[in-house]
Structures are given as structure tokens and as C-alpha cells.
Amino acid sequence: MSRTIWMLSLTAAAQLGCALSSHATVASPLGTARSSDELVALLKTPGPIELETIASCDWEVDRSGLINLNHPRAKEAGLEEGPEPIQVFFHVLRHPTEGTFLVDTGVEKALRDDPERAATQGLVAKLLHVERMTFLMPLGAWLAKEPAPPAGVFLTHLHVDHVSGVPDLPATVPLYAGAGETEARRLQNLVVAPNINRALAGKGAIREWPVSADPAKRFAGAVDIFGDGSVWALSVPGHTHGSTAYLVRSTQGPVLLTGDASHTRWGWEHDVEPGTFSDEKPGDAASLAALRAFVAAYPEIEVRFGHQR
């Protein structure tokens, strides 16, 4: 096969066959698009949400995926490729009237107990270096201690390390994510998508947040999830097409869950966007800048990063 035909074949594959997931999506019945000005007006008022962040596993991944090592600040700091210690989290939100919800899902119990039957397997498991994981609290182990399943799961995005725990959920638990999250096309999705689809198999259609342009222009969009201003879905595209951060008005004050708009503390503190794990670096840099500007303006917000404390 000539080089030209090979390149055309790769281009066609990227354009035609490489969506992140083929899982069904529907419009979310939950959530209303609002101006982020309405969120700002509530920040100094204690919220109703009991929030807990749980480390599902300890892990190490390539630093170049988490931090753009080509950024001038990263070069100035002398950051180099190597293993970066991280954790995989899920967050538990307990609303006094709406029930218990999760943000992301940690890791699947089978990944620890029966890896050949886990949704994440084969080449993807090797590339992710699952053998580097030290399991702390797989989602299935946490669910076994709960009196009832969660009322829903709010996903920051659909990368494997954020949907790995989905197979542990009952099929009746609804899943929510950013608009268009499944549609982004990349060549690597030829390998990744089967793992995402296995994780989502048997679950209901992903409910997409009703994102529209934020009139206050802080974010690409802001959605008041319950209508009471307690939890907000903030559209922060770049890491993935539908990447979503969540602002939780907890009983201890407002907490920003960045998702992978910022994997690491160093990236956040030095305003350096994620690296090769992101779909679109300029968009990711813009979303990170928007979140950092938001927290700088309202320092009462506690920040919890995608993969580090």
C-alpha cells in the first residue's frame, strides 16, 4: 500500500469510524441552562449538599499525558517525562431531598477481582498500565455498603478512568454527561471505544446536559442541575468535547470538581493545561483559564482536581 493510500485510509478512519462511544444519548430531563451570574450570587450562602471524595485507587501514569510538557512554564520548571502519582476518584453528593448522586465512578470491582471480565481489558488495559493500580475502594465495594443505589451519576467525561466503575451500577441508575461527549472522533478511539461501550453496556441512554451559551461568558455554559442552585454543571470543553466540571454548594462551602480540565495540582497552580490525554489543547487551556479566573475571583471556592488531592 502506498504512503498516500495509507494516509487517506487513516484519515477516513478518523473521520468515519472513531466516535468515543456508540452508546445511545438523549436530552436530560434534569437541569436548566442559566447564567453563571446566578451561581455567583449564591456562593457565599452555605449549600445543602454533603460531599465526600473517595479515592478508588492509587495509580501512576505518564506525566506528559497529565501536563503539557511543551508549555514554556513546564520547560522552565524542568518537568520531564516520567511516572506521575495520581488517584482515581469518585465523589458522593448527598442532597437532602433529591437523594444521593455520584460524580464519576472510580474503578470497577472486577478490575481488582476478576480482570479478565472487566470492561477495561486487552490493549487498553496494557496501555493504561492497570498493573500499576493499587485498589482502595472499587465502586462495587462502596455500593455494597450503601442502603440503596445512587439516584444518578454525573460524569465529567467518558474516558476509561472515569467510567470504569459504571458496570458496578444497577442498570436503572441514570448517567448524565456533557452534550456531544460521545461524538468526538479520534483515531485512538478505534481501540478505546470498545472498552467504553463495554463499560456502558446494559445501561440506559446517556442524558446530555442542556448546555447553552453562558450569558455571563464565564464558561461555555452553566446548568443548574436541581433547580435550587445546589449543584451546577459547567461546560469546559477541550480535554474532551463534552467535558464538564461541577460546582457543588456543600455544607462546608462551595467546591469545584474540575474533572480533567486539570488533572494535577501543579498544572492548576502554574496554569498549564493537560498534555497528550486531551483532545484539543487550545480549548483545554481556555477552559482551565476560565476555571482559574473563576476561583481567583471567588477564593471561597475549594478546588478538587481530576486526579490529585
Image (cartoon, helix red, strand yellow):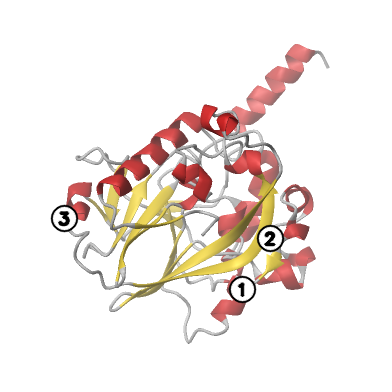
- Regarding mark 1 in the picture, which secondary structure is present there? loop
SS of the residue under disc 3: loop
Q: Tell me what residue is drawn at x 31 percent, y 57 percent.
A: 301
Q: Is residue 207 left or right of residue 47?
A: right
From the viewer's side, name the closer residue of 157 and 47. 47
The residue where tag 1 is placed is 137
10 Å crowding of disc 2: few (<14), some (14-19), many (20+): many
Answer few, some or many: residues within 10 Å of disc 3's Cα (few below 14, many 20 plus, some between 14 and 19): few
Query: Which of label 2 and label 3 is nearer to you?
Result: 3
Q: Which residue is mark 2?
A: 119
Q: Work out how far the residue at label 3 is from the one at label 1, CA to CA, in angstroms.
A: 36 Å
Marks 2,1: beta carbons within 8 A:
no
Q: Which mark is residue 41?
A: 3
Q: CA distance from mark 2 to mark 1?
A: 17 Å
x and y, in percent, of residue 98 in the image: 31, 74
Along the line of sight, the residue nearer the viewer: 14 or 124: 124
* Residue kind at label 3, given as amino acid type: Ala
Asked if residue 194 is positioned above or below residue 69 in the image, the reply reads: below
Residue 21: x, y in percent? 57, 47
Q: Is residue 298 above or below residue 252?
A: above
Task: Tell me the kind of residue under disc 2.
Answer: Ala
Q: Amino acid at mark 1?
A: Met
Question: Residue placed at 47% from the left, 83% from the top?
Answer: 148
User: Is 171 drawn above or below residue 74 in the view shown?
Assistant: below
Please tell me which of labels 3 and 1 falls first in the chain. Answer: 3
The numbered mark at residue 4 is none
